[in-house]
Amino acid sequence: MPRASTNFVTVLLLMVAAACGGRDATVAAVTVDTLANGAVRTMSSAPTAPGSVTLEHLLDIQPPVDDSTELMNPRGLAVADDGSVLVSESGAGHIKVFGPTGGFQRSIGRRGQGPNEYEVAFIAVRGDTLLVQDPEVARLSRVLWRSGSYLNSVRTGCCYWSSFGVDAEGRAWVRSISQAPDTTFRHRQGFFRVGVTRDVIDTVFAYERKDLPEQPYWEIRSGSDLQMMMVIPLQPRAYYEVDPTGTLLTGWSGEYSLRETTDGRDTVAIFGRSYTPVPVASNEKQRIVEDRIARQLANGRQGGPDEATYRKAFDASLIPDQQPAYTNVAVDKMGRRWLQVPTADTSVVQFDVFSRDGRWQDTVRLSRRDWPNEGVWAAWGRDRVAVRLEDEDGRPLIRVFAIRQR
């Protein structure tokens, strides 16, 4: 993110949050200053309201085996304002709608390339409108999800298989593989912005600042021929996440600081917190390598790289000695920012929760078995979050948590 010099005035806010049950009061320091470009920077050293935010298991969605509504291979998730959960099935071309109590309501679409037909379905919901991005046919469709009525479609871009979000102005930010006009930035991302009720508005590119290191990769080779490249685990990376109550958040996880931008270049606000990196021991690095090798072999195609090739490529010494500042970024429909952060306790998943104005409010922990390994398998609503999991038999299920804030 762009650097800017600090204005002369720095405001130090001391907030005292008294915990219930006779616990000691917590003094949380939040430093707010205005940068030379007018952006407000908010940095925290401790939560301002510890214990105020929780995620409570509300229900599981898992229709019976061999039922017509059974979940086969869920890909995309979306949570409507009333708590309904929409699920797109990989390879099936349709979207299943489950009501606020988990009951099946309807199926939308089918496989194909005609109106209300999909080869691949990444989904988002805004109000009564379901948006379906199909990278296979480079098209975004609009559907009334309560009835399943198809409205229309607009051309976007192909080949970028990724979830997307909708900002406060009703623009879907669909990721694009278009070549950025400024290639001096190592970390950049293109977007088609498409209106919920209008066609393509524009194309924008989000950039992280120029002084960041290049993303290192493991190279899998057959002799001198490059077969594939994989990002080395635990390397800091750039994040781009749409804020449903604003525009776009970006950040580089080598430091605990994120920015708000309207067009990918400007900076209207910065927020973050102080942190101590979590170290990575040599035995943990080797565990990561073994896990990656096992996953590649399990998912590999016939004639693909063998175990010896992966072992030669996956050099554990290239894995960083410390975890990145955060490992996922999400924003719910109330504007709360959820940053998944590393922890020495591998049995839990931990989130730092920031308010819409950038203050660190609370830390939330869940059991690791209740949260997917990949943050992309989660969809955040106003007061609920839905995640894709598997039960002990390997059957997919959707777990829904209530977001409680007091």
Image (spheres, grey):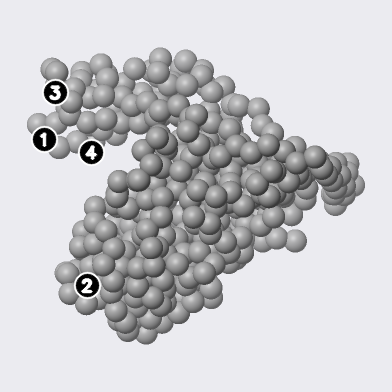
Q: Which labelled disc corresponds to residue 117?
A: 2
Q: Position of residue 189 (x, y in %)?
A: 39, 46
Q: Amino acid at mark 1?
A: Gln
Tag 4 residue: 299
Amino acid type, residue under disc 2 in the picture: Glu
- Mark toward the viewer: 4 or 3: 3
Task: Residue at 17% x, 74% y: name it.
Answer: 114
| Residue 302: assigned label | 1
Of callouts 3 and 1, the N-terminal one = 3
10 Å crowding of disc 3: few (<14), some (14-19), many (20+)? few
- The residue nearer to you, when weighing 115 against 101, is 115
Identify the mark at residue 93; answer none if there is no mark.
none
Element marked by disc 3: strand
Amino acid type, residue under disc 3 in the picture: Asp
Classed neighbour count for the residue bearing mark 4: other residues with Cα under 10 Å, few (<14), some (14–19), many (≥20): few
In the depicted structure, whether residue 114 falls above or below residue 268: below
What residue do we see at 46% from left, 43% from top?
Answer: 207
Q: CA distance from mark 4 to mark 3?
A: 21 Å
Where residue 70 appears, as percent x and y from the top left, is 31, 66
Residue 278 figure quarter = top right
Mark 4 lies on a secondary structure that is helix
Task: Give the mark nearer the N terminus: 4 vs 3.
Answer: 3
Mark sitting earlier along the chain (2/4): 2
